[in-house]
Amino acid sequence: MSEIGTSELAAQLPQILQGLAAGEEFVLTDAGRPVARIVPTSPSVPKETLTDDQWQKGFDTWMKEVEARADRYPPGFVLDDSREAIYGERENSQL
């Protein structure tokens, strides 16, 4: 975790942004006293680049898993996950 003085903040902004993108955290200090912590929005996870064939293979595997679970529901079952179905009863009961 690197310390940055408030007087240096503007001058070092490009380096700070690069550090944040790499997962680094910073402590902002004012007259040597810590006043804030600057952290990346999410953990740094290297993005994996997939070829079209790799992506298709992963998707096909996922679809097979989904199809294997299809018999868990009774014939004719339709999932209603609309907002109205989820929240409708709750909104009506508060009236």
Image (cartoon, rainbow, N blue to C red):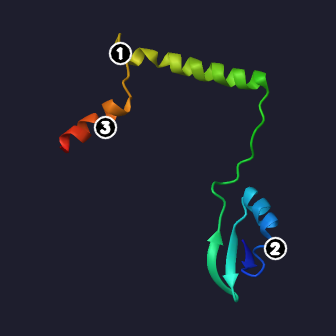
Quarter where residue 49 is shown: top right
Q: Earlier in the sequence, mark 3 or mark 1?
A: 1
The x and y percentages for residue 90 are 25, 40
Q: Earlier in the sequence, mark 2 or mark 1?
A: 2
Query: Crowdedness of circle 1 by 10 Å Cα count: few (<14), some, many (20+)?
Result: few
- Say what secondary structure mark 1 lies in: loop
Q: Amino acid at mark 1?
A: Phe
36, above or below 55, in the image = below
Query: What residue do we see at 58% from left, 19% from top?
Result: 63
Query: What residue do we see at 79% from left, 60% from top?
Result: 18
The x and y percentages for residue 57 are 70, 21
Q: Earlier in the sequence, mark 3 or mark 2?
A: 2
Say which mark, if any, is on residue 87: 3
Task: Return the residue at label 2.
Answer: 11
Q: Amino acid at mark 2?
A: Ala
Is 16 on the left-hand or right-hand side of 92? right
Say which mark, if any, is on residue 77: 1
The x and y percentages for residue 34 are 64, 82
- Depth-wise, is mark 3 or mark 1 nearer the camera? 3
